[in-house]
């Protein structure tokens, strides 16, 4: 459902939020080709991109992009699930190779894996949420992009995998870096516990959103509010996000 309606959802948010510059692409090739145009504007942009054109691979991720005055472009890919998943990593390697072919040394690329998504089918909605969250946290992302452009790393953080670093894919652990807002729809209590261990106090962060949100909603309380018990205990917060975005699109 989200794949078919994604262009409309993207347009509705892009119209509403100043300088969001949000787009969606059905293939990595489309994204790389359109990046030529964005580089000329010097504007920041965000995107929800199909990671791999190979048949049967429909996984989407979010990209946050800065086009610097020097002519350099830095891209931070936000993977809601695991970037080291064998189904996902080939797409990141191909993307880095394609970017290097097109732009040479004038490109920097990093991947932050959140591991908040534990399901197989929610990547579109998670990625849209992450593109919007990156916009809301743009001051932090501005600093990360500066680090990436100047030093090739973000906050001197070591990569998750040295072999992939050799292929130009710099993968970081989101639990150590991303703000709590990126985990408001996390499926697993364990993920929130890991986040709290890495970033003490994160579970108490106010993550409320939406026009009717008047009272503080901590990350931990949201997880409990949306927890359901089936074969395993998990949060269905992403379903609330889905309903809210559908309503937003219908009203726009």
Image: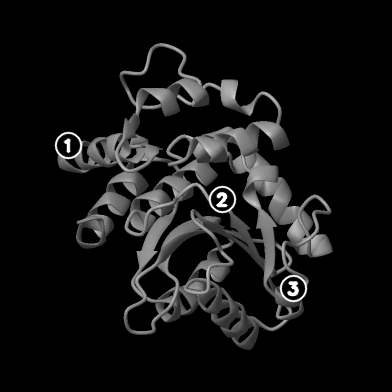
- Residue tagged by mark 1? 251
Q: What element carries label 3?
A: helix
- Residue at position x 34%, y 71% in the image: 58
Q: Nearer the viewer, mark 2 or mark 1?
A: 2
Q: Which of marks 1 and 3 is in front?
A: 3
**177 horizontally vs 28: left or right:** right
Q: Residues within 10 Å of mark 3 (few under 14, many from 20)?
A: some
- Mark 1 / mark 3, whichever is N-terminal: 3
The residue nearer to you, when weighing 205 against 17, is 205
Across and down, in percent, residue 237 comes to 35, 35
- Residue tagged by mark 2? 114
- Cα distance in 3D space between marks 2 and 3: 18 Å
**Taking the image as drawn, is residue 136 in sight?**
no
Q: Is mark 1 on a helix, strand or loop?
A: helix
- Mark 2 / mark 3, whichever is N-terminal: 2
Across and down, in percent, residue 123 comes to 38, 57
Q: In terms of image quadrants, where is residue 217?
A: top left
- Residue at position x 39%, y 81% in the image: 53
- Residue at position x 39%, y 38% in the image: 234
Q: In this view, does 23 lie above or below 216?
A: below
- Residue at position x 51%, y 77% in the image: 91
Residues at discs 1 and 3 in contact (Cβ within 8 Å): no
- Residue tagged by mark 3? 165
The residue nearer to you, when weighing 236 against 137, is 236
Q: How crowded is mark 2: few (under 14 residues within 10 Å), some or many (20 or more)?
A: many
**Taking the image as drawn, is residue 89 in sight?**
yes
Q: Residues within 10 Å of mark 1 (few under 14, many from 20)?
A: few
């Amino acid at each position: 459902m989200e794949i078919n309606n994604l262009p409309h959802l993207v347009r509705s948010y892009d119209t509403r939020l100043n300088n969001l510059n949000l787009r969606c692409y059905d293939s990595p090739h489309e994204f790389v080709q359109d990046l030529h145009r964005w580089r000329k504007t010097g504007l920041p942009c965000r995107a929800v991109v199909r990671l791999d054109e190979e048949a049967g691979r429909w996984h989407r991720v979010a990209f946050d992009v800065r086009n610097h005055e020097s002519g350099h472009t830095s891209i931070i890919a936000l993977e809601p699930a695991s970037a080291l998943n064998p189904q996902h990593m080939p797409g990141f390697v191909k993307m880095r190779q394609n970017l290097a072919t097109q732009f040479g040394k004038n490109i920097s690329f990093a991947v932050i894996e959140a591991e908040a998504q534990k399901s197989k089918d929610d990547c579109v909605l998670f990625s849209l949420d992450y593109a919007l969250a990156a916009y809301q946290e743009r001051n932090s992302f501005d600093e990360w992009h500066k680090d990436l452009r100047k030093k090739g790393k973000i906050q001197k953080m070591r990569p998750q995998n040295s072999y992939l670093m050799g292929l130009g894919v710099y993968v970081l652990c989101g639990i150590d870096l991303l703000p709590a807002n990126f985990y408001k729809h996390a499926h697993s209590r364990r993920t929130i516990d890991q986040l709290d261990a890495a970033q003490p106090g994160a579970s108490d962060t106010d993550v409320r959103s939406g026009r009717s949100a008047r009272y503080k909603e901590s990350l931990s309380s949201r997880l409990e509010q949306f927890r359901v018990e089936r074969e395993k205990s998990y949060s269905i917060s992403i379903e609330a996000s889905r309903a809210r975005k559908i309503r937003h699109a219908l009203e726009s």
